[in-house]
Amino acid sequence: MSAKITFVTFGKVKRGATGTQNESYALAKRLYDTGRLQHLVCMETTQTELPVPKEMILPNPRLEGWHQQFRRLLFKIDSHHSLPNKRRLFEQTFDWLVCRSGCHEGASVLLFNRPGFPKTVEMARRAGIKTIAIASVLHPKFNANLVRLEQKKFGLPDRSVYTDLKRVKNLSRFYSEVDHLIVQSQLSRDVFLSHGIQPERIHLLDGRFPIDTERFTPDVEAVPNDPFRIVHLSHMNLIKGIGTLLEAWKKLDLPNAELVLAGTIDPDVQTIVDRMEAQHVTLAGPVEDPAALLRQADVFVSPSISDSFPYTILEAMASGTVVISSNHCGLSSLLHHGQDGFVYRYDDTSALVEHLTWCHDNRGRLSEMGIVLRAKAVACRSSDSADRILELVDRILD
């Protein structure tokens, strides 16, 4: 008989979203459809989004007493925009609530797709329950060191969630104590190994990915943009490497070209943008249709200083858009450097300038490179991402 699994995540479980929210939905639904879901732990979902009985969802909104009071506190923390260390307080409060919610009752395994649950992992260990985590980020100490370098480089105050020492300690404790860790890139495996995670605890998922190749498609009637358009799309915080991209953009001084930065933007990144005073930069804000934005780009740049699994690289590839990626993006390994895309050292501004210049000067080559990237995205597409993860979970348990 297959093991009963309690699935634990932060935030919402939402169908049709991107990234972790969509992965959470697929996993929760597959567990429920196969009769393996013991409990679902999340901040929010509905039966419209996911047809799981209310009694299986924790923390239960009908809880009374201390649990209910902590739930109210959790939402208060989440809505308080000016609270220092808000992210850490949110995670610690939710962890406290989850480990007292009864999520382990009847379960053989706790499966996490977010870090930040060290108390819940300790509770599971005392109860003799296995814990498995899907690594959604690289090791927190690795991230903290790189973000501190960004802060120093651009003269920014130390106020990032990535450099909050207490939060770094909590997340590191989670990764150190969880029984098994599922990673989705060789970069992620190497980083965790370098931070003391034993190799037998790290399990690399095969190279197929949940990419929607029907939504993200090339524009078959596309002609070269005028102006030449370089696009970046993310929640822009310091770890996304926007400073290096802007430095390269200023050095380029390309004629008839524009840089589009799309997505939400953190205050530190906004400070960098304001100081740079770079010309022909468009801050597009959150976009309703990222597929349209990517297919309208000549080049997509993923300049992250640390990113375990940037879905936007896959989405750009599926859109037939040439990708330039730093070597600290987990999916940069999909690119064949110089043939269908470019990979540069994450802090090498000159290399990024060189690759962007080549793309600008060889615009006639970009469409054929895009065809190769589209074919790669289709070849590594998997509609059964949840099944692949659960198959690996079962192999780990065996």
Image (spheres, rainbow, N blue to C red):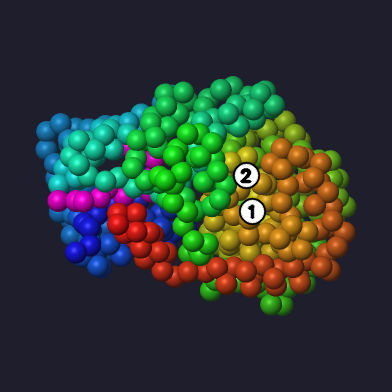
x then y, percent, for residue 25: 35, 59
Rendered location of residue 78, percent (x, y):
36, 36
Question: For the residue carrying disc 2, how many other residues have a C-alpha within 10 Å: few (<14), some (14-19), or many (20+)?
Answer: many
Which residue does the numbered mark 2 point to in the structure image? 328
Q: Amino acid at mark 1?
A: Ser
**Would residue 227 appear left or right of 232 to someone viewing this image?**
right
Residue drawn at x 67%, y 59% is 335
Q: Where is residue 210 shown, x and y percent of the image?
A: 48, 64
Specify the quadrant of the image occupied by residue 274: top right
As for residue 109 lying within the magenta part, the answer is yes
Say above or below: 4 vs 248. Answer: below
**Numbered disc 1: secondary structure:** helix
Asked if one can make out residue 92 in the rendered structure from this viewpoint, the answer is: yes
Q: Name the residue at 80% across, 52% down.
A: 355
Three-letter amino acid code of the residue under disc 2: His
- Tell me the magenta residue range: 106-117
Tag 1 near tag 2, CB within 8 Å? yes
Quadrant showing the N terminus: bottom left
State whether residue 398 is above or below residue 177: below
Q: Main secondary structure of the magenta part?
A: loop
